[in-house]
Image: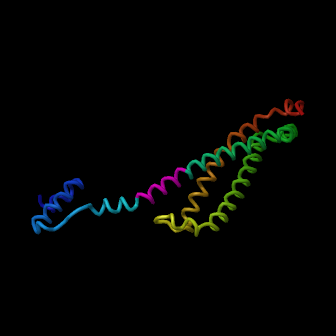
Amino acid sequence: MNLALCTQADPTSLASAVIGQARSLDRDLAVTNVRTMTQIINSSMSGSQFNAFLMGTFAGLALVLAAFGVYGVLAYAVARRNHEIAIRRALGATKGDVFRLVLGKATFITFLGIVIGWVGSLSVTRLLGSLLYGVKPTDPLTFAIVSVTLGGVAALAAYIPSRRATQVDPMVALRYE
């Protein structure tokens, strides 16, 4: 088999073609463990690829847990402030005012969390720098994408408690307390 014809073939036929060419040149030549460069690169990168997959999986799980955490904290905060929200509504606050109040609080907490996350991630970049491939540890685009993603997730998680706060009936909430 000609080696030029084997470039598109599967790796096993390419390996047998290389062994056949080597034996046709010298019968006493020992040729073993013939692999393509793609196979060598893939085997050397498999550990790094697994680590990247594992880190991506845990990052996705952390994002989901963060969304549930933001939702839980905001839902609790809205439930604790039902009396205050009812008084605001009784004094003339509109549903939009209440929605903006709760969403504004969520935005502040999210912004504070993102800033603390920036500081924390910048402080541990040297530890994670060896695990990154093709991205510098202080890449501003990565920081921007992560910040926007977490901000969006937090906004979605804050939406339900904010909408629930607009449904507070002032008379019912004031009688309850």
- Please name the predominant secondary structure of the magenta segment in the image: helix
Comparing 67 with 9, the one in front is: 9
From the viewer's perspective, is 36 left or right of 143?
A: left
Q: In the image, is 2 to the left or to the right of 120?
A: left
Q: Residue at x 56, y 51 (%)?
A: 58
Q: Indicate the position of residue 156 as horizontal and vertical percent values.
A: 64, 45
Q: Position of residue 122 (x, y in %)?
A: 63, 67
Stretch in magenta:
46-57
Quarter of the picture containing the N terminus is bottom left
In this view, 150 is above or below 173: below
Please identify the quarter of the rendering in which residue 8 is found.
Answer: bottom left
Task: Tell which of 132 and 23 is nearer to you.
Answer: 23
Picture layout, residue 154 above or below residue 95: below
Q: Is 123 colored magenta in this rendering? A: no
The quadrant where residue 31 appears = bottom left
Q: Position of residue 95 (x, y in %)?
A: 76, 39
Query: Horizontal placement of 45 versus 29: left or right?
Result: right
Q: Position of residue 110 (x, y in %)?
A: 69, 54
Quarter of the image for residue 169 reads top right
Horizontally, is 7 left or right of 49 in the view? Answer: left
Residue occupying image coordinates x 71% and y 38%: 163
Q: Nearer the viewer, residue 122 or 25?
A: 25
Q: Is residue 55 inside the magenta stretch? A: yes
